[in-house]
Amino acid sequence: MIGLLITQQVDQFRERFGEYLINSTSYHDLSKEKDYHNLIGGIIAPLARKYIIESNRESGLGRFDHMLIPREGKKVDCAIIIEYKIAKNKDELVSMADTALKQISYKS
């Protein structure tokens, strides 16, 4: 699943991650942004050989949730910034995603 993310196959990653969440977690497990932060932190931890993984660090005018920076000498194509948002319903999803993208663009 994480291989899809680091190879920029975002749609496939989204689908696989959604399946993972439905099959492996409960609504009660993931009710706050920090719950997702900690879950993804554990999932991406094995990438530490190829990436410098930073969490909740100040950057520009704000703070990102996770950033993966390629380590020097590793054959990695891109850095990754992850920002978490919680939507209360499907109608909020697009708006929250736009908010996250604007936050990354404006504050980093």
Image (cartoon, grey):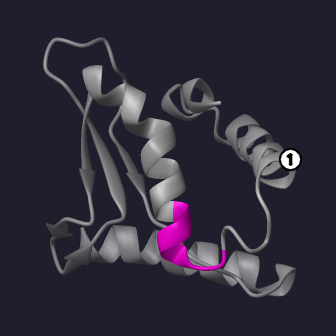
Q: Position of residue 16 (x, y in %)?
A: 77, 38
Quadrant position of residue 63: bottom left
Q: Residue at x 53, y 75 (%)?
A: 33
Quadrant position of residue 75: top left
Secondary structure of residue under mark 1: helix
Specify whether residue 43 is painted magenta: no
Specify whether residue 34 is painted magenta: yes
Q: Is residue 49 placed above or below 84 in the rendered structure?
A: above
Q: Quadrant of the N terminus?
A: top right
Q: In the shown orientation, is residue 71 left or right of residue 2?
A: left
Q: Residue at x 67, y 83 (%)?
A: 95
> What secondary structure do most residues of the magenta stretch adopt?
helix
Q: Which residues are the magenta region?
A: 31-36
Work out whether residue 50 can be spotted.
Answer: no
Q: Position of residue 91 (x, y in %)?
A: 83, 85
Q: Which residue is mark 1?
A: 23
Kind of residue indicated by mark 1 = Asn
Q: Residue at x 16, y 12 (%)?
A: 73
Quadrant position of residue 53: top left
Q: Of residues 15 and 40, which is closer to you in this image?
A: 40
Work out whether residue 60 can be spotted.
Answer: yes
Q: Is residue 7 placed above or below 14 in the rendered structure?
A: above
Q: Quadrant of the C terminus?
A: bottom left
